[in-house]
Image: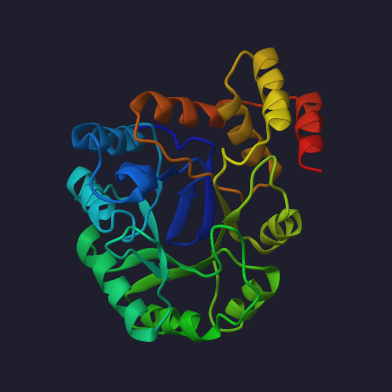
Amino acid sequence: MSATPPGGVLTLADDLSLSRMGYGAMQLAGPGVFGPPRDRDEAIAVLQEAIELGVSHIDTSDYYGPFTVNELIKDALHPYPEALRIVTKVGARRPADGSWAVSLGREDLIKAVHENLEHLGLDVLDVVNLRVGSVGGPVEESLAEPFSVLAELHEVGLIRHLGVSSVTSAQLTEAQSIAPVVTVQNLFNVANRQDDELVDRCAREGIAFAPFFPLGGFTPLQSDVLDGVAARLETSAQQVALAWLLQRSPTIVVIPGTSSLAHLRENVAAASLELPADAIAELDAIGA
């Protein structure tokens, strides 16, 4: 890895430092995050280019594809650069119809961790996020039972660090009562700000907050504001949205996904965009 990590580095533990501009590998799968990529060669090239650009944080899951994305990461990057950290997640599975099925049983979670290890070609996973709730938002219920399974796998050395995804603040607290939590991955972007308080809590506690769908869910009016700010700064709306997240909190890490080399370069360039105070105020208003 030759380039300076874009957006700087967030250090969460002695053995866990993430480039704040990460790469989300979900879009490398086929349509609907199911099946192989449309263009395998470009998918491989995107992963290799991300590393060349200094990205040291890849977000993935074995249920992307399923399996195909992790296998692509292995084929493209193994043996992995020393600084690279791969964050994966468990808690769902993909039946043959392409749906997303909850998979939080003890044996299912153990199997999922071992499959992630196999498909990524690793002996230990850097970070495993437990996915509960749904893409639509968290569901307030106990996560103690499934999180305890991951804590056991951490204790035996298969997982270095644990995280949670699609959770409430109360669920984060519950998880912390079982084992340390280094990452939270929830829906959050400039227009969807329901987790403002959780973002601030993660900053206080030194926990990485990784927003999923950092570039999605905007209304036409909100998009108009983004487009206006981008035009004034002579950049793209996507770069403005990513830069806003990086400036929102010192422990936010962004994981935009793409299967395009051009979009990858544009996303990484957003880490160098410094939004002026008037632009931040205008953007803050659309999520209020």
**Of residues 216 and 171, which is closer to you in this image?**
216
Q: Is residue 121 visible?
A: no
Q: Position of residue 260 (x, y in %)?
A: 35, 29
Does residue 228 appear left or right of residue 14 in this picture? Answer: right
Q: Position of residue 74 (x, y in %)?
A: 21, 51
**In the picture shown, does residue 107 fall above or below 272?**
below
Q: Position of residue 266 (x, y in %)?
A: 47, 25
Does residue 207 appear left or right of residue 5 in this picture? Answer: right
**Of residues 73 and 68, which is closer to you in this image?**
68
Q: Is residue 266 visible?
A: yes
Q: Quadrant of the C terminus?
A: top right
Q: Quadrant of residue 55?
A: top left
Q: Quadrant of the N terminus?
A: top left
**In the picture shown, does residue 232 fall above or below 270?**
above
Residue at x 47%, y 53% (from the top left corner): 17
**Of residues 22 and 80, which is closer to you in this image?**
22
